[in-house]
Amino acid sequence: MSPKCPVPPLQETSLSLVARQLIHTLSKISSDEDVALHFTMVSSYYESMGVTSDIFQDLINLILTSDYLDPAVRFFTMKLLLKENVKSLATGMFPCQFYKRILELIVEQGRHLTSLNLKGVWVKDENLPLMYEIIKNLPSLTALSIPYIANDEILKYIGENNRVLKILDVSGETDITEIGIDVMLSSNPQLTQSLSVVNIGMYGEENVDHTDVALLIRRLPNLTNLGCYSYVGKAVNYVYNHDCPPGFKSKLQYIHDVQTNSRTMRAIIAICPSVDTIYLEEPDQGVLQQIKDLNCLNKIKLNKFQCHELHQLLDKIGHKISTLMLSGSLGSFNFTRIAETCPNLESLEFYQCQTATHEEEVPFNKLEHIEIIQGNLSGSCLKYLMTATPKLKKLIIGDEIKLDDNDMARILRRYKFPYLEAVWFPNAPRLSRDTVEMLMESCPKLQSLGQLSGWNYTPDDMMLMRAIIASTNTDMVLTPLGIFQQGT
């Protein structure tokens, strides 16, 4: 039977209660004149109750991440709780009329922050001086996230004022150029030693030139990740072929590249020995075979690739691979061959599989996560994937499920699913309430089942089952509408 809902921890319950009281109080503020009185009342109450700085941090995190709340309540929460011992601030989404007020607040009250995330606060033009002031005031920042905000001047201020920054997010559509990157990296040696993650650029677009990104690779010795950037391989190739110091090695662990050719792959292998995850889109013929020389690799993501080339690669290094994320395959993908060559595979995601086959039912002994959308799966192939994965935790199949209740009954009687936590079949017209009940009865850890609007499952069935779930305190979510129908 699906597990019972656990008793909420006392800390979580107490925090929720205090947050509700605070939200109720701040919602009564109708003008700036009301602020002082309400703040005095709340502060006095917290002081008398012995509230610690940890509680202020937890409260501000909880309320600011609740986007459904009135933005005025979230702003006043920030104003009230942003005290000396609150080290981390993530503003969340706000309307434009709050941008300047939030920046002014951080200037006044946020000098102690070590982590700042301004995603959801758009800073441009007349408000940029406030952004510069914030950076000057925060020399102890270790994480700064300002997507869609950065320009060369901001990078200049970061370089001049931040010496311990480890994570910098300047992704999105920005005005960053080689000048700003060079100034930031030239300002102090401490920053270049500290930075390890830089999120820059936009997926699929070279809005920051790869020759500029090459500066980051060349001059940040501890850089491990260039998140969001789709042309990392191109930048690595530029470093390799333009005055690369003898013996130079990058610590990059993640490479994303588009239309990778053999020269670029050779450069990656030569100067990026620590790569454990690679994402290649439309690689040239023969490039996949070179991947075998990346000794630390354990995760592969591919888009628009030849299946036979992947199989040839996995024949050599499949034993090292824990994750495969594949899309837009050309040719025939053989699940049995994957099971044979990848005994340590834990996650398999596949989108737009041209042809899927299987032969002998070789087990996936460590596979926990299967997600296949537009996989052209036959009924026998789906049965194989379900029954050959003894440690399966999550199963998402976007194709039409041709199995019926009797098929599922036979599978559930013969095979045990002791670890299964989530099943998502958005298009399963032959499955009904009987399968829902069998899954809940047979799978002791099952907590999520959907998308039932694609099943032979009526609104009355849903109401009845939800009533049973509530009355028996079962930890189960039945989802009528899921990710596959959102926005359609």
Image (spheres, rainbow, N blue to C red):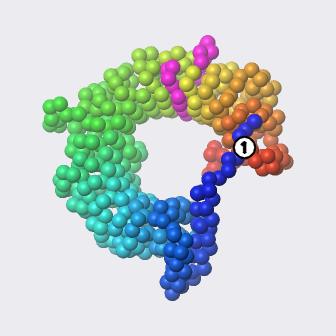
- Image coordinates for residue 479, horizontal then vertical, percent: 71, 46
Residue of label 1: 4
Tell me if 447 is positioned left or right of 29 in this view.
right
- Image coordinates for residue 343, horizontal then vertical, percent: 51, 20
| Image: magenta residue range | 342-364
Which residue is at 53% across, 84% downward?
A: 37
Tell me if 24 is positioned left or right of 410 in this view.
left
Residue 362 drawn in magenta: yes
Residue 230 drawn in magenta: no
Task: Find residue 296 and report its image quarter.
Answer: top left
Residue 286 visible in rendering: no
Image quadrant holding the N terminus, namely: top right
Which residue is at 27% across, 66% downward?
A: 136
Farthest residue in the top direction? Answer: 360
User: Closest to the observer: 289 or 188?
Assistant: 188
At numbered mark 1, what does the secondary structure look like: helix, strand or loop?
loop
User: Closest to the observer: 19 or 127?
Assistant: 19
Q: Is residue 412 above or below residue 187?
A: above
Which residue is at 82% across, 34% downward?
A: 434
User: Closest to the observer: 279 or 163?
Assistant: 163
Density class for disc 1 (Cα within 10 Å; few <14, some 14-19, many ≥20) is: some
- Image coordinates for residue 63, horizontal then vertical, percent: 55, 64
| Amino acid type, residue under disc 1 in the picture | Lys
Farthest residue in the bottom direction? Answer: 33
Q: Is residue 218 above or below residue 18?
A: above
Q: Main secondary structure of the magenta part?
A: loop
Residue 53 visible in rendering: yes
Q: Is residue 58 above or below residue 233?
A: below
Tell me if 454 is positioned left or right of 205 in this view.
right
